């Protein structure tokens, strides 16, 4: 049975106060304050990453993106928001169980992290790990800040939960409503290089992502690239 919770009710059920600044999975000190922007430039591999942003109460999900990745057997790192996981608990479990996918943290509600308090920052990151653990029994290793906005406080907050911050060196442009599928294909296929971390979206705001993705994957494989998750990306 697929029980639907409101976001606040779900947090209470799994033992997190909606206003709590931290959770029981937090580490007492930063484990790794590094930031990953790309992989090794001498290795012919790249990482596809997809953000499941969850602003507002009704985050979306373009199931076609996952279908393409599965049908082409393409590994990817998926950064899931807390509200997104609450809305799609069964999908979250399925994605976490797949050997193709690595799951990362994309904050609870996708705010501009530089504009919120320190306590709210910890809650935005920590509650996501707790939600994911409650659904899957697993923990996360990577974190991506909303909008790609980064400060030392954000990196340190993520590290306090044992998370390494992941950015990207190739934005696909898929949230831009003026980008056609053809333009996405051309841009990503031309701009990808050794070690690229490509960011796309799977929350329904990557307007032509699913349409463009099969050709992007085929083109990049034709160029000799091997797809890996961020965790398997070789770095300098």
Image (spheres, rainbow, N blue to C red):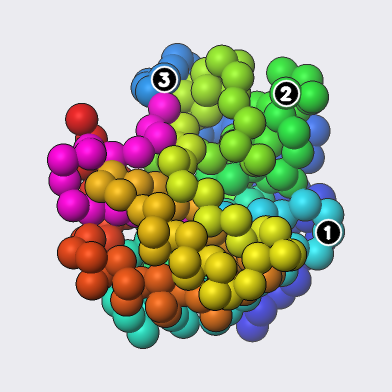
CB of mark 2 within 8 Å of CB of mark 3? no
Q: In the figure, 112 relative to 172: above or below?
A: above
Precedes in sequence: disc 2 or disc 1: 1
Residue under pointer 2: 114
Residue 161 % position (x, y)? 49, 29
Residue 227 % position (x, y)? 27, 61
Alpha carbons under labels 2 and 3: distance apart: 17 Å
Q: Residue at x 63, y 52 (%)?
A: 81
User: For residue 216, which quarter of the picture?
Assistant: bottom left
Residue 171 % position (x, y)? 53, 49
Which residue is nearer to you in this view: 80 or 8?
A: 80
Alpha carbons under labels 2 and 1: distance apart: 21 Å
Residue under pointer 1: 57
Residue extent of the magenta highlight: 35-50
Q: Residue at x 63, y 31 (%)?
A: 149
User: Can residue 137 be spotted in the picture?
Assistant: no
Label 2 Cα neighbours within 10 Å, binned few <14 / some 14-19 / many ≥20:
some
User: Can residue 228 be spotted in the picture?
Assistant: yes
Placement of the N terminus among the 4 image quadrants: bottom right
Secondary structure state at the residue bearing disc 2:
helix
Residue 195 % position (x, y)? 28, 45
Q: Is residue 101 left or right of residue 110?
A: left
Q: In the figure, 78 relative to 107: above or below?
A: below
Secondary structure state at the residue bearing disc 1:
loop
Number of callouts = 3
Q: Residue at x 35, y 38 (%)?
A: 38
Residue under pointer 3: 33
Precedes in sequence: disc 2 or disc 3: 3
């Amino acid at each position: 049975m697929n029980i639907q919770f409101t976001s606040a009710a779900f947090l209470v059920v799994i033992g997190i106060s909606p206003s709590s600044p931290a959770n029981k999975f937090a580490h007492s000190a930063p484990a790794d304050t590094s930031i990953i922007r790309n992989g090794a430039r001498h290795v012919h591999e790249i990482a596809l990453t997809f953000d499941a942003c969850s602003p507002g109460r009704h985050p979306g999900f373009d199931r076609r993106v996952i279908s393409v990745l599965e049908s082409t057997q393409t590994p990817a790192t998926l950064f899931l928001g807390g509200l997104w996981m609450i809305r799609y608990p069964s999908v979250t479990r399925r994605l976490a169980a797949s050997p193709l996918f690595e799951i990362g943290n994309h904050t609870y509600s996708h705010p501009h992290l530089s504009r919120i308090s320190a306590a709210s920052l910890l809650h935005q990151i920590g509650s996501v790990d707790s939600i994911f653990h409650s659904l899957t029994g697993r923990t996360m290793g990577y974190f991506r800040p909303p909008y790609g906005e980064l400060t030392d406080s954000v990196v340190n907050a993520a590290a306090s939960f044992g998370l390494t911050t992941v950015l990207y060196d190739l934005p696909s442009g898929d949230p831009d409503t003026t980008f056609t599928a053809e333009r996405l294909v051309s841009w990503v296929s031309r701009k990808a290089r050794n070690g690229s971390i490509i960011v796309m979206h799977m929350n329904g705001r990557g307007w032509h992502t699913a349409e463009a993705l099969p050709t992007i994957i085929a083109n990049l494989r034709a160029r000799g690239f091997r797809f890996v998750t961020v965790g398997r990306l070789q770095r300098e």
